[in-house]
Amino acid sequence: MKTHRPYLWFALLLPIVAFTGLVVRAELLRASGSVFHVAIVGYDPRDLLQGHYLRYRLQWPTDGECDGATCCLCLQTSGVHTKVACGVVDKTCDAQLSRPVVEQGREFFIQENAGPALEQAIRRGQGAIALNVTPNGQVHVHELFIDGVPHRRWLRDNAQRQ
Amino acid sequence: MRLERQVQRWQEAGIIDASTAERIIAHERRASRPVLLLAIGGLGAFTIGVGLISVIAANWGDIPRLVKLLAMLGLFGANAYGLVRARGRQYRWVTDALALGYFALTLASIALVGQTYQLGGEPYQALLLWLLVGSPVLWLAEGAFAALVFLGALAVTGAFSFNPLVDLLGHDPHATILVGASLGSAAVFGPLLVASLPTLQRLRPAFAATYERLGWGLFVLAASCGVHVWYLSMDTNDVREAWVGARVVLVFVALGLWRVQGLVSGARADWLLPARALIGLAAAITGLGVLVPHAPAAMVGALGFVTVWALVAWCAYQAQTMQIVNLATAVIAARIFVAYIEVFGAMLATGAGLIVSGALLLALAWLWVRKIRLQPGGAA
């Protein structure tokens, strides 16, 4: 059965175009806005690991005047994040995250053998996520940091120390 | 070599001429699969593949993002080059394998972007994108396996899309029933409706034949389960809920009754009436069971089941598919025995009950072997 040549090229190029589009979109999202480091806690205190994924959520800072369901997380490039009332224009905030976005369960892809060490580190409160916030309020995750260093380097240093 | 000898014998006996002999050998060579070579080659490729995957997986975290993405583009390029080269060649299975590989690679590429950039999307989004951009390549394949893979991908995407669709409709109970009825009806009637499309039958006959067989199998399975709804009691609340999804199911039943004619070629038109009777009666018995309030009526369920399989036997008889006729009559015999156990189950605790049930089973087996089972020629 013959297949027309234009159809052949369409069928072959479509996945490549989609793949390239996804990569370009991800790169653009990654480059939009400043990068913030936000402390994290385990999403499920009993089991943070799910296959190759570490489950976590962003941690609310203790600082800030706001308290309650209408609070947003005020992100600052200085690394000092606070709680502010949502909808109030606060010029000290470089970006704001609403409560549902902050409390949403998230997953970070890790090497399976790195799971137990990273799980322990996050339980001890050493973990932070580097992220940027896109203009439409979406969180785009860059890297998992442990004790202020990228998690892979922390794992290497940790292995050498042992 | 056996084929060549056989064709030579036919030619010597004057059954076929030289040009026909050449055409037969060319056709069989094109369609033949070197099974042993494929098995050894496949095993070797599989071993290398597993080894490569193990090495890559062990160092996955240390491989830079750009390298991973470029490697994926390289895999796409190599697979696409293979497909372009294989197009129109005599070994169709190579094209089929490469097309399936390309389809799988498309899903892998979407997963790679999600993992590399830590995108936290829902699985149904990735699956929908995969179907949208990856499916066209399956049309390059011609074998039945590609048709099954597409259907499998569609089923998995449908299963993952159920909850998001319900979420989208605001968790309304009626919306949940409507989504469930739509996906369920599409699963039962979809393959038959697609198989009846003339374009598919003309351009990809293997796809159409696979979907037709699978479609009838799914329909008979669904009908066999559906008629057992008479074993349950239906109150007015259940019936009210059932009416919500009934409209969607009715549309699919009507489409099935109409499009079944697309499955009938001129020579086999005899089974159009029994096929329509099967769809209509199974839908009617199941429909009445869910749309009319009733107390449990096991007898109706059992008779409904026997009716469905009697119609299957009639269809198969008209289509001269004797294996299906035999299967259907065997299923009816087994169901009669189950009905006997349902009615006289308590008697099985006694010796006399066991003797009677054993005798009934033997009588049914004798009846089936001697009086009902048909030989390939059509004789009992």
Image (cartoon, rainbow, N blue to C red):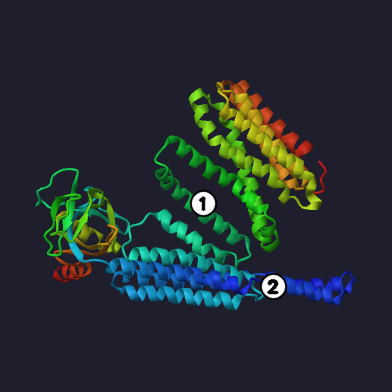
Find residue B112 and report its horizontal and vertical position in percent: 38, 66
Disc 1 residue type (three-letter): Ala
Q: Can the viewer see residue B354?
A: no
Few, some or many C-alpha atoms within 10 Å of disc 1 (few <14, some 14-19, many ≥20)? some
Provide the chain ID for the residue under circle 2.
B
Q: Earlier in the sequence, mark 2 or mark 1?
A: 2
Residue A152 relative to residue B246: left or right? left
User: Which residue position is annotated with label 2?
Assistant: B30
Residue A56 relative to residue A148: left or right? right
Numbered tag placed on residue B241 in the rendering:
none
Find residue B204 and report its horizontal and vertical position in percent: 66, 62
- The answer to which quarter of the image holds residue B231 is top right
Q: Dividing the image into 4 quarters, which one contains the N terminus of chain A?
A: bottom right
Disc 2 residue type (three-letter): Arg
Q: Can the viewer see residue A142?
A: yes
Residue B19 relative to residue B350: left or right? right
Q: Are marks 2 and 1 in contact (CB under 8 Å)?
A: no
Say which of marks 2 and 1 sits in front.
1
Badge count: 2
Few, some or many C-alpha atoms within 10 Å of disc 2 (few <14, some 14-19, many ≥20)? some
Residue closest to the eye, B349 or A79: A79
Vertical arrangement, residue A10 with respect to residue A84, above or below: below
Vertical arrangement, residue A72 with respect to residue B102, above or below: above
Find residue A74 and report its horizontal and vertical position in percent: 16, 56
Helix, strand or loop at label 1? It is helix
Q: Dividing the image into 4 quarters, which one contains the C terminus of chain A?
A: bottom left
**Are the residues under marks 2 and 1 on the same chain?**
yes
Residue closest to the eye, B190 or B18: B190
Q: CA distance from mark 2 to mark 1?
A: 32 Å
Helix, strand or loop at label 2? It is helix
Task: Identify the residue at image location x=60%, y=66%.
Answer: B141
Numbered tag placed on residue B155 in the rendering:
1
